[in-house]
Image: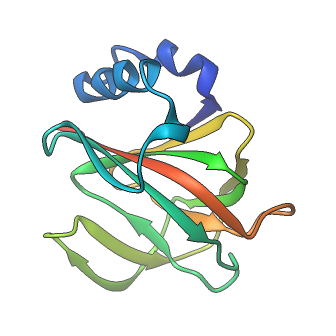
Amino acid sequence: MITDSILRLGQYRGLYKNLDTAIDFLAGCNLNELPDGTTQIDGSRVFVNVMEADLREAEGAVYEYHKRYADLQINITGSEYWELTMEGRPAAEFDEAADIGFVSGQAHSMGILGNGRFALFLPYEFHKPSCISSVSSHVRKAVVKIEIS
């Protein structure tokens, strides 16, 4: 997991080829102008989902994880609370087609997105995004899906 200012996203260039593709795309676009829904960046290797989202209570919510894709989460408006756990108990069977699984566990790290911050959750990292923050219960956000191989 990496969390930082969107202004410093370029310093992570070179970690993964497809992350570089995402960084190049984000450097040349205005997130406010992206339409809701999916925008292809590099086919199924890199794409962005833009959405309006009502946030949920963190307590009692499960953590998600992916095997194929990293999630680069960026709030366009509003802010959200997130958590990360290092250990999880399966809460549902992994859905290979959707590349998502769910686990329950205890928080080991947490933070707030918004105001120019991002979080990059790598494959197999159990993360709980989209939780109510102290100032927001709704966000418009971009989730860049980055295939990691």
Figure coloring: rainbow
Specify whether 145 is left or right of 142: left
Q: Is residue 136 left or right of residue 102?
A: right
As drawn, 147 above or below 92: above
13 left or right of 18? right
Q: Position of residue 13 (x, y in %)?
A: 39, 15
Question: What is the residue that sits farthest to the right in this orientation?
Answer: 134
Where does residue 139 sit, x and y in percent of width and height?
Answer: 64, 60
Expressed as whole percent of the image width and height from the top left, the position of residue 105 reads: 56, 75
**Image position of 122 with respect to 126: above or below:** above
Q: Residue at x 32, y 20 (%)?
A: 20
Residue 59, quarter of picture: bottom right
Q: Image point 70% across, 55% down: which residue?
A: 110
Residue 4, image x, y percentages: 64, 30
Quadrant, the C terminus: top left
- In the image, what residue occupies the spot 70% across and 79% down? 57
User: In the rendered view, does 7 fall on the left or right side of 17?
Assistant: right
Q: Residue sitting at 27 percent across and 49 percent down? A: 69
Relative to 100, does residue 61 appear above or below in the rendering?
below
Image label count: 0
Q: Nearer the viewer, residue 25 or 110?
A: 25
